[in-house]
Image (cartoon, grey):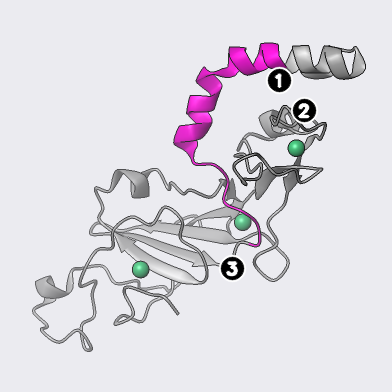
Amino acid sequence: MHDHNNTLEWDINDNHIPKRLGTALGTGSPNTVSGVTTHDAFQEWADGHSRFVYRPDSEEARRHSSGWAMRNTNNHNVHILKKSCLGVLVCNKHCILDNGDTIHLRPAICDKARKKQQHKACPNHKCTGRLEVQPCRGHCGYPVTHFWRHTEFAVFFQAKGNHDHPRPEPKSSAEARRVGHSYKFSRGITRSLLLNNSIASSLQF
Ligand SMILES: [Zn+2]
Ligand SMILES: [Zn+2]
Ligand SMILES: [Zn+2]
């Protein structure tokens, strides 16, 4: 198991999660320490069964951020935020771009927006495919889950499952793509006119 805080025994669902820095408790040995000894650097692509402890002032941790497209999920424990993976948007023809890359876009977190993304024309101009969501089945057939829990001294993170799909493009490039939208929009219409003489399918892109 890849685990930076492996000197500590804790599970995010424990009643008593470590609350204080080990040094504050005055214990020297990392094996006997009952608190968090170090904070981890933020892990954008945490995968597999993993646990991290972030600084309470970590901006990414405060936003419960991830490279994976995660949406809030109901949790019986209101003190622990649970999120589950939405997978990735892929081309239904699984086309390969000139640079050898494949289509792996970021699914929208909002249900309505994500519904709109599907069945759009594949952004590869040489491809006639459509976008579809490849769901995550990385946790015993169900989506990978992330758990977040805040204490005064740390933000605890725990992931369960191994993503069984490509990484979605990071948020930053998804935003950059949105800026260049008008260009793709006109290209999409042109392509659509040439291929099937219909612009209806591209109007929403
Ligand atoms: Zn590591
Ligand atoms: Zn395609
Ligand atoms: Zn996933």
Q: Quadrant of residue 196?
A: top right
Disc marking residue 121? 2
Q: Is residue 5 above or below residue 196?
A: below
Q: Is residue 22 above or below residue 82?
A: below
Going by the numbered disc 3, the residue's amino acid type is Gly
Position of residue 138 in the picture relative to residue 40 (left or right): right
Q: Quadrant of residue 148?
A: bottom left
| Prevailing secondary structure of the magenta residues | helix
- Which stretch did the figure color magenta? 164-187
The first of marks 3 and 2 along the sequence is 2
Mark 1 vs 2: CB contact within 8 A: yes
The Cα atoms of the two marked residues, 3 and 1, are separated by: 33 Å
Q: Is residue 137 above or below residue 122?
A: below
Query: Residue at point 24% right, 71% down?
Result: 36
Label 3 CB less than 8 angstroms from ligand 3: yes
Position of residue 21 in the picture relative to residue 166 (left or right): left
Query: Residue at point 82% right, 31% down?
Result: 128
Q: Is residue 201 visible?
A: yes
Secondary structure state at the residue bearing disc 1? loop
Q: Give whichever of 125, 65 is nearer the camera.
A: 125
Residue 140, given in percent of the width and then of the height, sits at 69, 71
Query: Residue at point 11% right, 73% down?
Result: 23
Q: Is residue 200 visible?
A: no
Going by the numbered disc 1, the residue's amino acid type is Phe
Secondary structure state at the residue bearing disc 2? loop
Residue 203, given in percent of the width and then of the height, sits at 77, 13
Instruction: Give the residue number, with chain letter if any, for mark 3.
Output: 161
- Number of marks drawn: 3
Residue 19, given in percent of the width and then of the height, sits at 26, 67
Query: Residue at point 58% right, 45% down?
Result: 168
